[in-house]
Image (cartoon, rainbow, N blue to C red):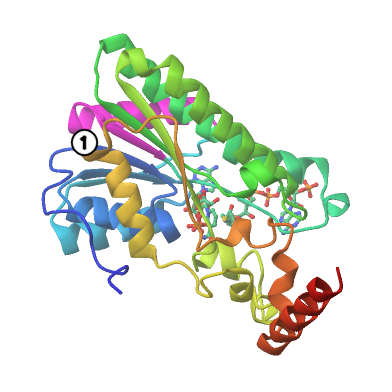
C-alpha cells in the first residue's frame, strides 16, 4: 500500500502562494510541507511566533520553498488584515487559503463555562470567517480569479457529536460557509471545498485533547472500519489535489477521509458485527428450518 507516499507530480503547485492557518503544528504543518515540496510558497500563521519560526525554517531548509511565518490570532480581524498585508508585501498575491486552525475541548458540555464555549467558537467559526472574508474581499476587489479556499472540518460537522459540542457547532458553520460561498463566489473564480478528517495522530488533537492512556483504554482505532488511524501524507495528498488546478471542477464538496469511521454505527444492522462465524452458520440453519415450516 502506497498511501504514505507523495501522490502528485513534482511542480504541481509551482508558484502558488498558500496561506495555512495553524500551519506550524500537526496536520497544518504536514500539509504545508507537502505543498512546499510541490513548489508552493507558504504563509504560516498561528498565535505562537516561535513555533511558526521553527516550522518555517524546517520546511524551507527541507524543500527550498520561500516561507513567511507570521503570528496572527485569527479571532481578531485586524490581525488577519495585517497577515494579508504582510503576505502581499512578500509575495504580491495569494492563491490559496487553507482554514486549518482550530481549538477544541473534549468535555461534558455542562462542565464548560460560557467563555470556554466562546473560545472554541471564536477560533473555529469566527476565525475561519475572518480569514475567508479578508482574503476573499481582496481577490474580488482586485478581480483576481482561480483562487481556492480549503476548510478543514470534521465529520461531526453534519452528524453532531456529544462531548465536543462547541467544536461541532462551529465546524457545522464552516461547512455551511463552504457550501454557501461555493455558489455565491464561483462567479468571481473562487472555489470552496472542505476536508473532513477522521482520527489522525497529532499532538494537538490526540495528546492534548485526550491525555494519558485514555485513547488506548477506549481503543479509538476499533471505531474505525479500516482499523487504523490516518497517515499525514494521505491527508496531504488529498489537500494538495484540492488546492491544485487538477480539481478545478470540484466546488462546494466535502471529502471525508476517515477509514469509514463516521458510518461505523450508522447502518441499522451494524450491531450484527458482534456475531461470530458460527453464529452466522446457526442463523442460516434456523432460517432454512423456518422456510421448511411455512
Ligand atoms: C474545559 C477549558 C479547558 C479544558 C481551558 N478552558 N481549557 N474548559 N476544558 N480543557 C476554559 C478556561 O477555563 C477559560 O474559561 C476558557 O476555556 C478559555 O481558556 P483559555 O486558556 O483562555 O483559551 P484559549 O487561550 O483561547 O485557548 C483554548 C485552546 C487551547 C485553543 C482550545 O486550549 C488549545 O490550544 N488546545 C489544544 C489544541 C486543540 O484544541 N487542537 C484541536 C484540534 S483537533 P473561564 O471560564 O475560566 O474564563 C479538532 C478535531 C478533533 O478540532 C476531533 C477528534 C477528537
Ligand atoms: P493542532 O496541531 O492543535 O492544530 C491547531 C492549530 O491551530 C495550532 O497550530 C494552533 O496554534 C492554531 N490555532 C489555534 N487557535 C488559533 C488562533 N486563535 N489563531 C491562529 N491559530 C490558532 O491540531 P491538528 O490535529 O493538527 O488539527 C488541524 C485541523 O484538523 C483542525 O481544524 C482540526 O479540527 C482538524 N481535525 C483534526 C483531526 C485529528 O485527528 N487530528 C480530526 C478531525 C479534524 P497556536 O495554538 O499556536 O495558535
Against 35, residue 94 (above or below) is above
Q: Residue at x 11, y 48 (%)?
A: 11
- Which residue is identified by label 1? 245
Image coords of residue 127 (percent x, y): 54, 34
Image coords of residue 172 (percent x, y): 63, 37
* Closer to us: 230 or 62: 230
- Is 262 contained in the magenta span? no
Against 13, residue 93 (above or below) is above
**As drawn, is 180 to the left or to the right of 277?**
left
Q: Is mark 1 within 8 Å of ligand 2?
A: no
* Closer to us: 54 or 137: 137
Quarter of the picture holding the N terminus? bottom left
User: Crowding at label 1, few (<14), some or many (≥20) Cα neighbours within 10 Å?
Assistant: some
Against 180, residue 4 (above or below) is below
Residue 25 visible? no
Against 158, residue 281 (above or below) is below
Q: Which residues are drawn in magenta?
A: 76-98
Q: Residue at x 78, y 58 (%)?
A: 107
- Is 84 contained in the magenta span? yes
Secondary structure of the residue carrying tag 1 is helix
Q: Residue at x 31, y 69 (%)?
A: 4
Amino acid at each position: 500500500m502506497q498511501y504514505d507516499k507523495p501522490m502528485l507530480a513534482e511542480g504541481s503547485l509551482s508558484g502558488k502562494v498558500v496561506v495555512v492557518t495553524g500551519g506550524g503544528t500537526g496536520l497544518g504543518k504536514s500539509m504545508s510541507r507537502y505543498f512546499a515540496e510541490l513548489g508552493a510558497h507558504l504563509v504560516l500563521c498561528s498565535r505562537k511566533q516561535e513555533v511558526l519560526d521553527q516550522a518555517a525554517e524546517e520546511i524551507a531548509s527541507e524543500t527550498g520553498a520561500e516561507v513567511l511565518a507570521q503570528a496572527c490570532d485569527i479571532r481578531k480581524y485586524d490581525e488577519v488584515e495585517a497577515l494579508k498585508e504582510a503576505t502581499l508585501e512578500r509575495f504580491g498575491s495569494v492563491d490559496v487559503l487553507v482554514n486549518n486552525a482550530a481549538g477544541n475541548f473534549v468535555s461534558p458540555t455542562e462542565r464548560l463555562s460560557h467563555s470556554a464555549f466562546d473560545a472554541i467558537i471564536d477560533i473555529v467559526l469566527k476565525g475561519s470567517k475572518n480569514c475567508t472574508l479578508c482574503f476573499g474581499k481582496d481577490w474580488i476587489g482586485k478581480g483576481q480569479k482561480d483562487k481556492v479556499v480549503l476548510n478543514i472540518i470534521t465529520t461531526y460537522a453534519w452528524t453532531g457529536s456529544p462531548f465536543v459540542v462547541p467544536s461541532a457547532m462551529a465546524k457545522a458553520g464552516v461547512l455551511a460557509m463552504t457550501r454557501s460561498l461555493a455558489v455565491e463566489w464561483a462567479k468571481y473564480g473562487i472555489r470552496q471545498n472542505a476536508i473532513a478528517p477522521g482520527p489522525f495522530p497529532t499532538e494537538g488533537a490526540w495528546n492534548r485533547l485526550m491525555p494519558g492512556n485514555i485513547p488506548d483504554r477506549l481503543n479509538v482505532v476499533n471505531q474505525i472500519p479500516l482499523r487504523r488511524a490516518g497517515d499525514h501524507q494521505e491527508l496531504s495528498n488529498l489537500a494538495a489535489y484540492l488546492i491544485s488546478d487538477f480539481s478545478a471542477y470540484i466546488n462546494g464538496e466535502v471529502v471525508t477521509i476517515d477509514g469509514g469511521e463516521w458510518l461505523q454505527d450508522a447502518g441499522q444492522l451494524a450491531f450484527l458485527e458482534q456475531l461470530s462465524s458460527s453464529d452466522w452458520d446457526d442463523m442460516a440453519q434456523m432460517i432454512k428450518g423456518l422456510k421448511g415450516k411455512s
